[in-house]
Image (cartoon, rainbow, N blue to C red):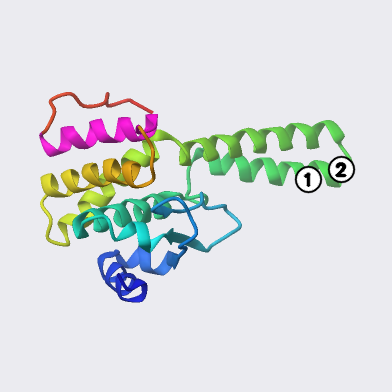
Amino acid sequence: MEPNAEIRRLLDVMPASGRMTTKIVSKPEQAKVIDASFPQPWNQARPIYINFDLWRRLTKPQRDMLLLQVVSWLTGVRWFKPDIYQGIVLAGLLGGLLEAAQSDVVGVAVAGGLSAIAFVRIWRTNKSQESELNADVAAIRIAQRRGYSEVEAAQHLLSAIEAVAKIEGRSSLNFSELIRCQNLRAIAGLSTVSIPENYQ
């Protein structure tokens, strides 16, 4: 597999939002097939690292679905969207500045603590199991615009998750992957048991 040709093909598979915010980087020394770091709020670059020597062991549909899932996860992490927690962080920071200007140490501590609590809540929401499940569903929706049916897309992503574990030499899937696989089996019609609606 020629990495540059595969990167060009993958860019065509990506949604426009993914092409604007993410970048595919060849990283032959990594042990993982595909990897992406959790995006920090101060860093706009969202690289996706692929070991193309391992990547070529997957089928084309599996590669498509893995990429779409990672892109969906990266673009789904939003630090600056208007909701209650972002409002609390902003109010806490502004309150802290006002209290600091008035030399009120207790006020600064309270405002800083409020901001920190809200920031941790945003962090946890973005790193939750729910964000992974949402990325799977988003990837399936994008794949449907690329010619896959919902069932096919779910089956390919399911088989890709299992294949990646074998390629990387892992004897079993981790807890997050097991939950995702169960949800994908339900979407693909391979199981009647889904995860609970309120699962997080």
Q: Is residue 174 magenta?
A: yes
Q: Quadrant of residue 18?
A: bottom left
Residue at left offset 36%, top offset 75%: 4
Judged left or right of residue 28, residue 98 is: right
Q: Quadrant of residue 190?
A: top left
Judged left or right of residue 122, residue 73 is: left
Q: Which residue is mark 2?
A: 102
Residue 67 image position (x, y, % from top left): 32, 57
Residue at left offset 19%, top offset 48%: 156
Q: In the rendering, which numbered label is found on residue 98?
A: 1
Q: Quick check: 193 above or below 162? A: above
Would you say the residues marked 2 and 1 are in contact, meaning their CB atoms lie under 8 Å apart? yes
Seen from the viewer's position, the closer of residues 106 and 162 is 162
Secondary structure beneath dot 2 equals loop
Q: In the rendering, which numbered label is found on residue 198?
A: none
Residue 165 image position (x, y, % from top left): 34, 41
Q: Quadrant of residue 115?
A: top right
Q: Main secondary structure of the magenta part?
A: helix
The image shows a total of numbered marks equal to 2
Judged left or right of residue 42, residue 23 is: left
Residue 133 image position (x, y, % from top left): 32, 39
Secondary structure beneath dot 1 equals helix
Seen from the viewer's position, the closer of residues 52 and 15 is 52
Seen from the viewer's position, the closer of residues 49 and 129 is 49
Q: Quick check: 42 above or below 155? A: below
Identify the magenta region. 172-189
